[in-house]
Structure formats: C-alpha cells, structure tokens
Image (cartoon, rainbow, N blue to C red):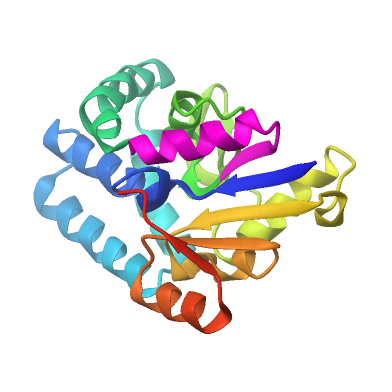
Amino acid sequence: MELALFDLDNTLLSGDSDYEWAQFLIERGVLDRAEYEAKNDHFFRQYRAGGLDIREFLEFQLAPLARHPREKLDEWHREFMRTKIEPMIRAKGVELVRRHLGHRDLCAIVTSTNAFITAPIAREFGVEHLIATELEVKDGRFTGKPSGTPCFREGKVTRLEEWLADQDRILASFTAIWFYSDSQNDLPLLDQVTHPVAVDPDEVLRGEAVKRGWQIISLE
C-alpha cells in the first residue's frame, strides 16, 4: 500500500484557510478590523518567511473560537465554506486527490491549520483522514488552546507518526509515501517521505527541490 499526504493551504487550495477565516470574521464584524487585520497580516508574513512562532499564532487565532458557542461557529463556517473556501478549491487539486484515491492509496490531509477550520474542507475533497492542529474542548466549547502537539514543521512528523501508530503502522509500512506541499515549513516532513513533491513552491522550497532533484508541479 502507498500513502499519499497533502498539505492544504496554497497546495490543494489556492489560498490560506487560516488567514481567510480571520478575514471572514473581520468582515462580519466579529473581530475588530483595526486590531486583528494587522495581526493577521503579520502572522501570515511570518509563515511565508518560515519564521512563524506557532504558539503565539495559535493564541491569536484560537481565542475567537472560545468566545462563541459551537452552534454559532458552525453557522459561520458554513458561510465561510461558500464564500471563501469553495472559490479557492483547485480543480487540479481535486483531480490529484481522486487519482490517489483511485489507486486505493491511504490518503490524508496534513495541515497546520486547526481541525475546526479544516475538517469540512477535507470532506469537500473526499479525504477521510485529517491530521491537523487539534483544539481543546471543555463542556462542548473550545477553550482557545491547542490540544497536543501543533501540526506544524517538526510537529507534522510527530502527529503523522502518532496517527500511524493508532493504526499499528509506521512509515516503513508503506511501499511509497507521497507528500505534496508548497512551503518551506514542510521540509521536515518532506525529508521523511519517498516521493516529496513541491507544489507551486515558495522560493526556499523551490531551491531545495531543485537541489535535491524533487518533483515540482503546479496545480494552478
């Protein structure tokens, strides 16, 4: 059996779901534009430059989830899917996922974006398995804190290994492992797979892919 792993933001999607969720809440007036838009842009630039402090970012990004009941968050998310996510779904990304599913590969989306945002997106792609930053829940509400290891940089490797262990598998259980990503932040996981694929990569990842002879593709 082969394993196919997909980054989500700027890989299967043509944008960043984390960033767009905050923008969506700003546009709805849930978050103060003057305060949150500048912070959202700041963290997005940090991420693209490979210097994101994941704990600081999660404190910013998860706090609004703790302020509202799950029913309201789910209502907003349905609108978010229609207005922000559906226009960002890459047709070639859908085709890529379907090709691996058609080969009966075990497929998973592996993303640093939290599971509340990304679970409905994974379902939209027809991917059953999601490895994402998990959220702490108490009494049916999000606390605004992550649960376990954030699924970011080396944390993606940790979370993948934990997910496989739950199935009594390890990376060596597979005849081939594919990982598709656009970002230098995913180099730790790209180093672990047999078929690393750079998708419309950032400058740093493109340089590494060229140097190491990795495949480079475009889903645009």
Q: Position of residue 130 (x, y in %)?
A: 59, 37
Residue 153 magenta? no
Q: Quadrant of residue 32?
A: top left
* Residue in the picture at 32% in, 17% down: 75
Q: Quadrant of the N terminus?
A: top right
* Residue in the picture at 46% in, 71% down: 184
In the image as oriented, which residue stretches furthest toward the right? Answer: 168
Q: Is residue 151 visible?
A: no
Q: Position of residue 77 (x, y in %)?
A: 33, 25
* Residue in the picture at 36% in, 66% down: 47
Q: Which residues are magenta?
A: 90-109
| Image side of residue 62 versus residue 153, left or right | left
* Residue in the picture at 21% in, 60% down: 41
Q: Characterize the magenta stretch by its predominant secondary structure.
A: helix
108 lies above or below 112: above
Foreground of the two, 208 or 21:
208
| Image side of residue 78 versus residue 192, left or right | left
